[in-house]
Image: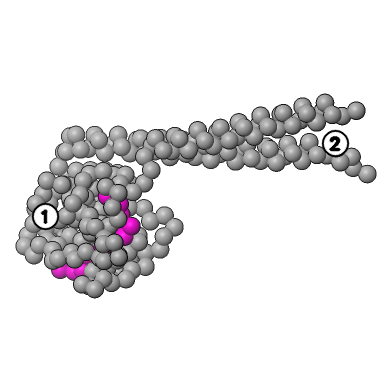
Amino acid sequence: MVNRQSATPVIGWIVAILLIVAGCMLGSWQLQRMHQKEAMLASVASVLRERVPRPLALANDPARAQAYDWAVGEGRFLPQPAWLLDNQQRDGRPGVRVFRLFQAEGDPIPLLVEMGWLPVGAARELPKVGAAPADVTAIRGLLLPPPSGGLLAGAESQTPDGQYLVIALDPATIAARSGVARIAPRVLRLDPDLPLGHARDLDVLPNTLPPQRHLGYAVQWFALAAAVLVIALLLTLRHRRRRP
């Protein structure tokens, strides 16, 4: 028969090792996310500091789908409903971010332009967006990847004034509803100094964790792994002292 007293420490160490490995993996993942966001913020800071004007058509370059550029150009906003991205915080208040399709001159592929943020009422009253400028408009701003939807679906509903309300920006859905073949893989966040749109800034982490938070979570996971190791060692020593 198996000696239960000798089997207990083995089972305990198996569980402890699994927990330690899991803690170290999660801590390493958080450190990786921290370094990714630090690199992203450094890239954005460099672009905003230099503000070298690039053409709006650069938004269509698949090789730069995850890059950041300062772009300028002229064109027209398509006469279509706006896309309201829900669950967007600003100064601690809930709201939506407004996006419109823009057709740059000489470019057959439209891109989404982030017009800014609008608040949502206490009883979930959605804001009235108003019409887009009808004339040829000069715009400039930061080209950046669209907000990540994570595991969220891109299903949409319509507001009382005919705009689309979504919880994630799905390019295929937007293109299909807008009657275009496809849209650019990047979006343009308007320069806050431009006299159009709504409240906005050039913060690229408005609704996600900053690098410091990822570091804090990494420390917690590594500390948990270390605590499991210490507890396993103490229990092993205690078990050996009790053995006859």
Q: Nearer the viewer, residue 127 or 77?
A: 127
Q: Which mark is residue 1?
A: none
Q: Residues within 10 Å of mark 1 (few under 14, many from 20)?
A: some
Q: Nearer the viewer, residue 28 or 241?
A: 241
Start-end of magenta stretch? 79-90
Q: Nearer the viewer, residue 175 or 204?
A: 204
Q: Would you identify the image quadrant in which residue 172 lies?
A: bottom left
Mark positioned earlier in the residue sequence (2 or 1): 2
Residue drawn where x is 25% and y is 53% of the image:
187
Placement of the N terminus among the 4 image quadrants? top right
Picture coordinates of residue 16, whole percent (x, y)? 68, 38
Residue named by callout 2: 6
Disc 2 element: helix
Instruction: Indicate the amino acid at tag 2.
Output: Ser
Q: Is residue 229 visible?
A: yes
**Above or below — where is 242 with respect to 163?**
above
Q: Residues within 10 Å of mark 2 (few under 14, many from 20)?
A: few
Task: State yes or no: discs 2 and 1 in contact (Cβ < 8 Å).
Answer: no
Residue drawn where x is 21% and y is 46% of the image:
201
Picture coordinates of residue 59, whole percent (x, y)? 24, 51
Q: Would you identify the image quadrant in which residue 170 lies?
A: bottom left
Residue drawn where x is 78% and y is 28% of the image:
238
Residue ranking furthest to the right:
1
- 180 vs 1, left or right, is left
Q: Which secondary structure is most common in the magenta stretch? A: strand
Picture coordinates of residue 144, whole percent (x, y)? 27, 48
- 9 vs 94, left or right, is right
Placement of the C terminus among the 4 image quadrants? top right
Residue named by callout 1: 196
Picture coordinates of residue 7, whole percent (x, y)? 83, 39
Q: Nearer the viewer, residue 203 or 177?
A: 203
- 145 vs 228, left or right, is left
